Image: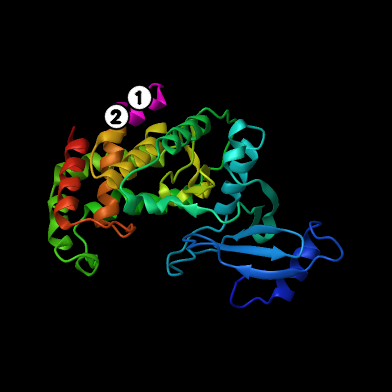
Amino acid sequence: MEIISKESSLFEIEKYIKKELNIFSSDEKILNIKVPGEGNMNVVLRIDTNKKSFILKQSRPYVNKYPDIKNSKKRIIVENEFYELIKKSEINKFFPNKIEFIEKDFILLLEDLGECKDMSYLYSSKTINEDHFNSLIYILKSIHQTKVKSFPSNSSLKKLNHQHIFILPFKKNDFPLDDIQNGLKKLSTYITNDLNLNEIVSKIGDMYLKVGKTLLHGDYYPGSWMERDENVYVIDPEFSHLGFKEFDLGVMGAHLTMVTENEEYLKKIIKAYSRDIDKSLFYKVSGIEIIRRIIGLAQLPLKMSLKVKEKLLKISKKMILG
């Protein structure tokens, strides 16, 4: 069954949940269904009953925001496995609790964290609360220290991510970048014309595709960070996989560099993480992520001038070239 907010009635969803799960009392009814945020990969619904509220996620054989992009709906199995791994860990309190997983329909039910706001507002505020930064480092370090005997490869989602991170932004392309910001297309040639840069990025992309030993969140950026009552939470571990820790750290570093428009947080992350890090790899991943967010398809709500973007691209290029 495909649960679609516009096409499925309250009655149909209620009937389905009552049939599949023992989570409703006899007098419980669904009162409201809302879309809690902009879900890129999966259908995400907030379901309010007369007794409680919870989040329903369902994966499809395509990307929810871009239906023409195909991908395995088994990716929700990876997310479920991640929640299973951390449920007895101290960091479980920073994630929504898993309620139930209906594998045959690729549906995951999660605790509703309430009226959180995702931390994409950082791109406008240009700064991050120091306590939030420390919490995010602690959470990431704890994820990386999680003991894992086996974990799904998540290969279909990794291949999709690989294309959009390591390939497409670094090749001459027809992205309509000037529709985003006039002059951005010309600025992108500073990156796409550099064959040496492309070669280094390609090698790191090959590393990304390999199976590593460290559990990663896989998409550790402000869109996956939530804030409520000054507390920090993390969601959407659907890109999770076993890889190298510098990937998560580099992505985090890239976004805080874009937030602050300087490199200050790169050194702060290394110091705060306080474990062995391949600094060269960390800086390279950070540079790659900044570039793909500025001239790639996965755009961010960045309120910055073309001159600032040029500065960040130059910084990123230096980080990659070492």
Q: Is residue 23 magenta?
A: no
Residue 89 seen in this snapshot: yes
Name above or below for residue 100 compared with residue 266: below
The kind of secondary structure the magenta stretch mainly shows is helix
Q: Amino acid at mark 2?
A: Lys
Cα separation between marks 1 and 2: 6 Å
Which residue is at a point 18% across and 41% down the rendered structure image? Answer: 315
x and y, in percent, of residue 231 in the image: 53, 42
The chosen color scheme is: rainbow
Residue type, label 1: Lys
- Asked if residue 2 can be seen in this view, the reply is no
Q: Is residue 153 left or right of residue 312?
A: right
Which quadrant of the structure image shows residue 35?
bottom right
Secondary-structure class at tag 2 = helix
Nearest to the observer: residue 247 or residue 171: 247
> Decide: marks 1, 2 in contact (CB < 8 A)?
yes
**Residue found at x 14% / y 63%:** 183
Q: Which residues are magenta?
A: 268-281
How far across and down, in percent of the image, does residue 78 sit?
57, 47
Quadrant (top left, top right, bottom left, bottom right) of the C terminus: top left
Provide the secondary structure element on which disc 1 rests: helix
What residue sits right under mark 2 in the picture?
267
Question: Which residue occupies the extreme front position in the image?
Answer: 229
